[in-house]
Amino acid sequence: MRCAVISDIHANLTALETVLDDIADGVEQIWCLGDVVGYGPDPNACVDRVRREDMICVVGNHDWASLGKLDLDDFNPDARRACLWTQEQLSEENREFLDQLPASLVIGEFTLVHGSPRAPIWEYITHASIATENFYFFDTSVCLVGHTHVPTAFHLSEQGPAVCERSWLNGERNLDLSEGRWILNPGGVGQPRDGSPSSSYFILDTEEMRVETRRVSYDIESTQERMQRAGLPQSLITRLSFGW
């Protein structure tokens, strides 16, 4: 089965629609690793599109925050302000949709979470040492995570000593997943943070055990204009231009 794997849409409809337009024919499912809302100007429209595309989706920390299920004091001031704005915008129907999303899913040889298999909502997997610990918390060959907005691969080989290696998936890359175990992050659709403002996502072949990293540019200024009109924090608007 060929799947598209996306994460961290963050209420950026322009980015989401551009990625969906870029996804090739022959993709049978879209897997979303959470944070459909938060930061951006289009929370209802993005949830509506996720629902319309019938995506398989897990919940993220901003999704929970929009439902009042997390303490907003744990967020930085600009993220907290955006969360409060999102709470006011969400329709009851979309709140119910986000509320029923699971924290983790297992599909064949793939575990889906937002943060980490050890702490699906909040933990960031940023370094090989954190990834190494998390390999003990899932049983499948591959765990797909989001949350950092940075396309990354952590590989635990079956050959030699159990050493976890990290690879930055800059640009368009292809990986063979048939050997060892993996923790993979497709990067961010709506708020990339790896120094490139273009949206990042995966095309995954679950039978061939291969994954391709895709990058696609979108109309950032149109998103920024909507954010300005909504009165969202300037730092969140500016960062989209630089991918940080």
Image (cartoon, rainbow, N blue to C red):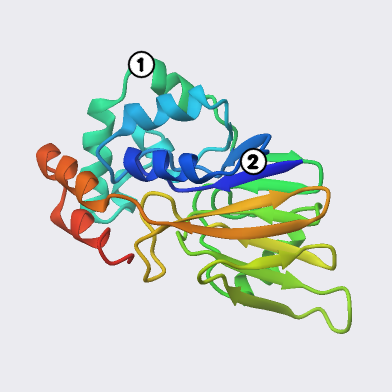
Question: In the picture shown, does residue 221 fall above or below 156?
Answer: above
Q: Which disc number belongs to residue 92? A: 1
Residue 99 visible in image: no
Quick one: 139 or 24, which is closer to the camera? Answer: 24
10 Å crowding of disc 2: few (<14), some (14-19), many (20+): many
- Please identify the residue farthest to the bottom as the structure is shown: 160
Q: Secondary structure at mark 1?
A: helix
Q: Which disc number belongs to residue 104? A: 2
- Which residue is rendered at x = 50% and y = 48% of the image? 7
Residue 123 visible in image: yes
Which is more N-terminal, label 1 or label 2? 1
- Which residue is rendered at x = 51% and y = 61% of the image? 124
Toward which corner of the image does residue 175 lie, by quadrant?
Answer: bottom right
44 vs 106, left or right, is left
240 vs 230, left or right, is right
Question: In the picture shown, does residue 50 fall above or below 240?
Answer: above
Q: Quadrant of the N terminus?
A: top right
Expressed as whole percent of the image width and height from the top left, the position of residue 67 reads 38, 30
Q: Secondary structure at mark 2?
A: strand
